[in-house]
Amino acid sequence: MKQKEDLRCTSGGRACSAADAVATSMLVVDDNYMMRSMIGRMLTQLAPGATCNVSSCGEAGLETVRKDTHHLAFIDLAMPDMDGREVACRIREIERELGRPPMPLVAMSGDLCAIEWIECQRAGFGAFLQKPFCANALRSCLQVVLPEALG
């Protein structure tokens, strides 16, 4: 599957059909190309029928949230254009403005202390993934925050 900035990928590089599991739209916001590509691939493999949008920065992620409805977002906490907590707060504002229910938000970082996690929860995050992580950790996270995505 060809990767590009702010791409939309589907399960296994193929179009989804009605026979697929629950159609779920997920968003990955991470400034690291390799990380967002890897997470996008893992998500579409773990969640058959899922659509995964990936954004290279907070502002691009917010624009994607404004345009499309998502069921779940994975957000890097340390990005150059804006902090992941700010992205989460602004996503919550967009959801309120558009009358959408709040989607689960998963914070991602290679380094997080307890005080930062409290700040993340205040910003709207409900789960955390420690980078780097494997497919099993991502599957466990999905089982908790959006089990219907796993089909």
Image (cartoon, rainbow, N blue to C red):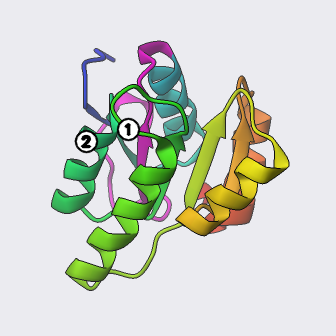
Would you identify the image quadrant in which residue 110 lies?
top right
In the depicted view, which residue is nearer to us: 150 or 19? 150
Crowd around label 1: few <14 · some 14–19 · many ≥20 (10 Å): few
**Side of 54 where 78 appears, left or right:** right
Q: Residue at x 50, y 28 (%)?
A: 41
Please identify the residue farthest to the bottom as the structure is shown.
99
Residue at 50 percent of width and 60 percent of height = 21
Residue 82's tag is 1
Mark closer to the observer (2, 1)? 1
The image's mark for residue 59 is 2
Name which residue type carries label 2. Glu
Check disc 1 and report its element: helix, strand or loop. Answer: loop
Disc 2 secondary structure class: helix
Quadrant of res 81: top left
Residue 32, how many percent across, how many down? 45, 18
Task: Write down the region rendered in magenta.
Answer: 11-34
> How much space separates mark 2 and mark 1, taking CA atoms?
8 Å
Left or right of 129? Residue 91 is: left
Measured as percent of width and height from the top left, residue 11 is found at 42, 39
Looking at the image, tell me whether mark 2 or mark 1 is earlier in sequence order: 2
Viewer-proximal residue among 19 and 63: 63
Q: Which mark is residue 67?
A: none
* Whole-percent x, y for residue 28 in the image: 44, 40
Q: Is residue 23 left or right of residue 75?
A: left
Q: Note whether 25 is above or below 76 in the view shown.
A: below
Q: Given contact means CB atoms under 8 Å apart, are the residues at marks 2 and 1 in contact?
A: yes
Tell me the amino acid under the disc marked 1: Met
In which quadrant is the C terminus drawn?
bottom right
Q: Magenta segment: does it hold 19?
A: yes
Viewer-nearest residue: 93 or 25: 93
Q: Is residue 146 visible?
A: yes
